[in-house]
Image (spheres, rainbow, N blue to C red):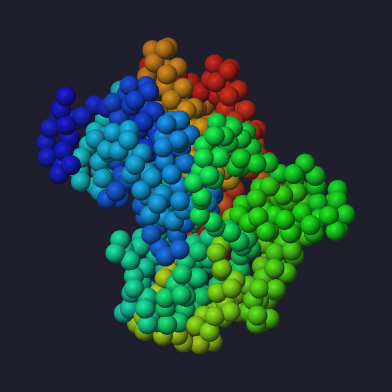
Amino acid sequence: MGTGHKDGSAGATRQLDAVVIGAGFAGLCALYKFRDVLGLEVQVYETGNGVGGTWYWNRYPGARCDSESFYYCFSFDDDLAQEWEWSGKYPEQPEIERYLNHVADRFDLRRDIQLATRVTHARFDDATNRWEVRTEHGECVSAQFLVTAVGCLSAANLPDIPGRDSFEGELCHTARWPSDGIDFTGKRVGLIGTGSTGIQAAPVIASEADHLTVFQRTPNFSVPARHAAFAPEDQAEIKKDYAEIFRLTRESPAGFPYFPIDRSTHDVSADEREEILEGLWEEGGFKFLWGGFNDLLLDPAANEIASEFVRNKIRETVKDPETAELLCPKCHPYGSKRPPIDTDYYETFNRDNVSLVDLKTTPIEEITPTGLRTSSAEYAFDVLVFATGFDAMTGSLLRIDIEGAGGVRLADSWAEGPRSFLGLQVAGFPNLFTITGPGSPSVLVNMPVAIEHHVDWIADCIQHMQREGKTRVETTASAQEAWVEHVAEVSTYSLLGRANSWYVGANIPGKPRVVAPYAGGQPLYRERCEAVVNSDYEGLEFGG
Ligand code: NAP
């Protein structure tokens, strides 16, 4: 079989069963399943110089997982789960990167992964029912299936602030951190952004830098992670129960091995409510969001009680009352922006070398060669850190020029916002599968759990096609329409769409406002996916 070469030199076009774009959690899982279980010939392309996706790129100080290690991992292989030792509850980026490298080695995945290769174009050929996939190096391959494993949060958003490129110090986005790090010792650092990333980075930068100035546009509700190292007996306990832990992650609303309590905020007395919230706060982590009262994300009054609880914690922690008030979110419900969890974030503002600037009252006007100017003051910096997030959910897909049947471009199909069937297929784009695509629960679920579900579903669909002798699969326009309507309707019941967050695309100027993830919860979503399979793939059309 011929090969299109990395340098773009001539050769017959390589014929593959599937191209997978991305070698993070999703790409590694897809390669394993498609190649080693289905027996397909698969090529993975990855932009980074190493595997890991999110955990390759996000090397900023303080980067660590905010789901607990022992279920933020693959469940598809028992031996893998039993062998791997996590150091503690919330591993730092290097440990997760090591884990994903271990997975790549353990399953001999590297031979089918081409690193340092960005896929630039993909065009569906109606005559052959195959995708023609091109890379930045001019390589071209042909594949029956195109599977995107590009991540929901991987297209970095570097806001075009006037004067940005004139800055003469070091300027860095957290998701494009230099591999040899940045030495903050003795430096004046400006940090823009107080999402999960900024909140993780601030305490670590503050502990190294001469001075840290945090520029906050919107305050965030953060809950302490309460990180702790694992003792050997913790690991043994977890491993004894692994099958049950993984089962719970598949059955719970958000992919965690626990459920919300079966009472609403108003079912209990004020004292009991306080006790429950206090217990969740003490335990720390995402339980405050996903393991608390069952009306937290549904009922604004219930949400306000939890929101005020967190505000009071901020007020108790931050010594300067003015700074504390600035850090208290008052314009969005708890959880309507993806809430961070932290280690010493609020405590950081008690340090002498940290100051907070409220961009709501004094917006940034320009970046200057020596720092930054707001409407009220000028600041000098040696380093400017942009923790400004991502063009989420759609950005990494739309940065590839994807052309479906009849030459229709994905960017045009999604001009008014993403449209999909189950977040897995897009009408007009046959043989394209989008792992954790918009319209699926994706970012509202512990990601490895959402990813494994999608990879399994896609693999089942491909096997179905193999059995039936089909070479083309495409969702119908009407199935897609019905799903898009359902996603939109479900989002109206939840408070998730209430904030200007990346969930709705509000962080990117000009992006259509659409609640991109499916807010109906994992159980309902899985039920719908299963119903499609059980109805002989109602909503999909097969051909060829
Ligand atoms: P983010 O949540 O979108 O936060 C970006 C921050 O930058 C916000 O505070 C935003 O303010 C601010 N910002 C954006 N553009 C700005 C501008 N032009 N001027 C001033 N401020 C600006 O991004 P993120 O913190 O990188 O987190 C993104 C997601 O990645 C998280 O929600 C989470 O899902 C994931 N993440 C996960 C982990 C983990 O698991 N450990 C860690 C980090 C991130 P506004 O709020 O006003 O827009």
Q: Quadrant of residue 535?
A: top right
The residue positioned 67% from the left and 59% from the top of the image is 282
- How many numbered callouts? 0
* Side of 153 where 338 appears, left or right: right
The residue positioned 61% from the left and 52% from the top of the image is 286
Q: Can the viewer see residue 219? A: yes
* Side of 346 where 113 appears, left or right: left
Q: Nearer the viewer, residue 326 or 390?
A: 326
* Side of 68 where 486 appears, left or right: right
Look at the picture and state if 142 lies above or below 314.
Answer: above
The spot of residue 38 in percent (x, y) is: 37, 21
The spot of residue 379 in percent (x, y) is: 45, 85
The spot of residue 473 in percent (x, y) is: 43, 23
Q: Can the viewer see residue 123? A: no
Look at the picture and state if 194 lies above or below 229.
Answer: below
Q: Nearer the viewer, residue 171 or 98?
A: 98
Furthest residue toward top: 468
Furthest residue toward left: 10
Furthest residue toward front: 233
The residue positioned 54% from the left and 45% from the top of the image is 234
Image quarter (top left, top right, bottom left or bottom right) of the C terminus: top left
The spot of residue 112 in percent (x, y) is: 26, 34
Look at the picture and state if 253 lies above or below 41.
Answer: below
Q: Nearer the viewer, residue 17 or 235?
A: 235
The residue positioned 63% from the left and 56% from the top of the image is 284
* Side of 505 where 465 appears, left or right: left
Image quarter (top left, top right, bottom left or bottom right) of the N terminus: top left
Furthest residue toward bottom: 377
